[in-house]
Image: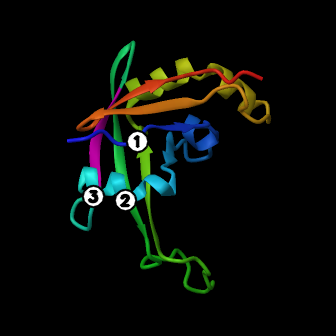
Amino acid sequence: MSNLPSFTVNPKKTFLGIDKNRSYCFTLERRLLELYISHFKLEGGKLQEDIIFVTDEGSFPATIRLIVQDKSKPRKDIFYRPWKNRDVINIGWKNKDQTVKMMSENLKISINLIERGLRNNRQNVGFEHLGENRFYVTFPKIRI
């Protein structure tokens, strides 16, 4: 079984859990969608899978989910929604206390910038697929 392509995320409010829902998640780039759906066998009866983030500090739990946005459950029927049906992959760690703590400790610069209303132009997070359900996570700083 081959490894999936690596990707980098620039953490924003939702990734860092600073949004109103304290989400701790992000949406995978569209270009990777089909590869990740196929690898994790995400479909109608199985929309999520547990994954592991591996760092120098240890292993941390997370979840990868397929979100089907087909307007089948609109919040309000009185508004016309011009959205197209689409699938997205969401990777998150809400309610995974160890993972929330690990991300927060490694992304202090990003959190500080965003809490002050500034753009995070200092830190990214790299995800490298190690096989099966494991991802090596790195926290490179951006040079300005």
At x 50%, y 25%, the residue is 103
Q: How many marks?
A: 3
The answer to whether the residue labelled 3 contacts the one labelled 1, judged by CB atoms less than 8 Å apart, is: no
At x 79%, y 36%, the residue is 117
Secondary structure type for disc 3? loop
Provide the residue span drawn in magenta: 48-53
- Amino acid at circle 1: Pro
- Amino acid at circle 3: Leu
Q: Is residue 142 left or right of residue 66?
A: right
- Image coords of residue 113 (percent x, y): 74, 28
126 drawn magenta: no
50 drawn magenta: yes
Which numbered marker is on residue 5? 1
Quadrant in which the C terminus appears = top right
| Residue for badge 2 | 34
Q: Quadrant of residue 111?
A: top right
- Image coords of residue 84 (percent x, y): 54, 77
At x 41%, y 57%, the residue is 33
- Amino acid at circle 2: Glu
Q: Is residue 76 left or right of residue 32?
A: right
Secondary structure type for disc 1? loop
At x 26%, y 38%, the residue is 133
- Image coords of residue 48 (percent x, y): 29, 52
Query: For the view shown, which residue lies furthest in the front direction?
Result: 2
| Residue for badge 3 | 42
Residue closest to the eye, 123 or 20: 123
Q: Quadrant of residue 67?
A: bottom left
Quadrant in which the N terminus appears = top left
Q: In the image, is residue 131 above or below residue 138?
A: below
Residue closest to the eye, 35 or 17: 35
